[in-house]
Amino acid sequence: MTTVRKAIISTAGWGTRRLPITKSIDKCMLPVGNRPIVDYVVRDCIKAGITEIFFVVNKGSTQLQQYYSDNAELNRFLEYNRQQDLIELARPPQNVVFHFIEQDSNEKYGTAIPVALVFPHLQKGESVAVLGGDDFTYHADGTSEIARLIEAVPEGQNGLLTATAPADELSRYGGVDFNEDTGLFAGSVD
């Protein structure tokens, strides 16, 4: 089994499919329940044993940094109002290191760019999970989809977690085709 301790989570981009809300809220910060989408990805990474996460963010964006930092003022407020039980909900995850790397939205754009931006921070031959910050899989039983994927990948190989979409909607998302004859994948973004 491959050991993966680092993840790259791409969160840059304008989220144009979700306008107008993404005009003021980063797409990865859109709420699902009382948490942003990206937090489901982060918690899945942590369950999978990942201890270092590289976020690739829009240049100048600070929403993720704020979310994954401790808020001393809020903690004091909760203590003062005898709501100490809520402090744990506001605390960032423990035993994980977060890095924030900016991507200029006026420069090159695509799914490989975040990997290229983080590449100098990786060791030669090191395995890393590459994830989208606005896509997640949730399991009510608490299991980790990322751990399942890592477990399924033989040492020295790579894996891909995919989903299917109707052909008439691919232009909204891009797609990956598998050629049965060659055994190769081909990606496209329309």
Image (tube, rainbow, N blue to C red):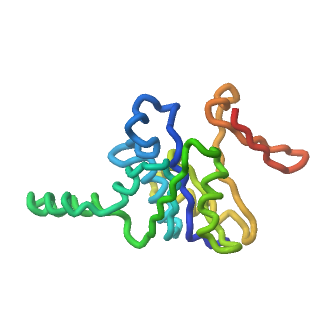
Q: Residue 49: image x %, image y %?
A: 52, 70
Residue at left offset 32%, top offset 46%: 34
Left/right placement of residue 132 relative to residue 82 reads right
Residue farthest toward the top in the current orientation of the protein: 168
Q: Is residue 1 visible?
A: no
Left/right placement of residue 176 relative to residue 179 reads left
Q: Residue 48: image x %, image y %?
A: 53, 66
Residue farthest toward the right in the current orientation of the protein: 181
Left/right placement of residue 164 relative to residue 142 reads right
Residue at left offset 41%, top offset 73%: 95
Q: Viewer-proximal residue, 101 or 43?
A: 101
Q: Is residue 26 visible?
A: yes
Q: Viewer-proximal residue, 117 or 5?
A: 117
Residue 188, picture quadrant: top right
Residue at left offset 25%, top offset 60%: 71
Q: Quadrant of the N terminus?
A: bottom right
Does residue 54 sit above or below 51 in this rendering?
A: above
Q: Residue 4: image x %, image y %?
A: 60, 69
Q: Viewer-proximal residue, 58 or 180?
A: 58
Q: Quadrant of the C terminus?
A: top right
Residue farthest toward the front in the current orientation of the protein: 106
Residue 186, picture quadrant: top right
Residue at left offset 38%, top offset 50%: 63
Q: Viewer-proximal residue, 3 or 186?
A: 186
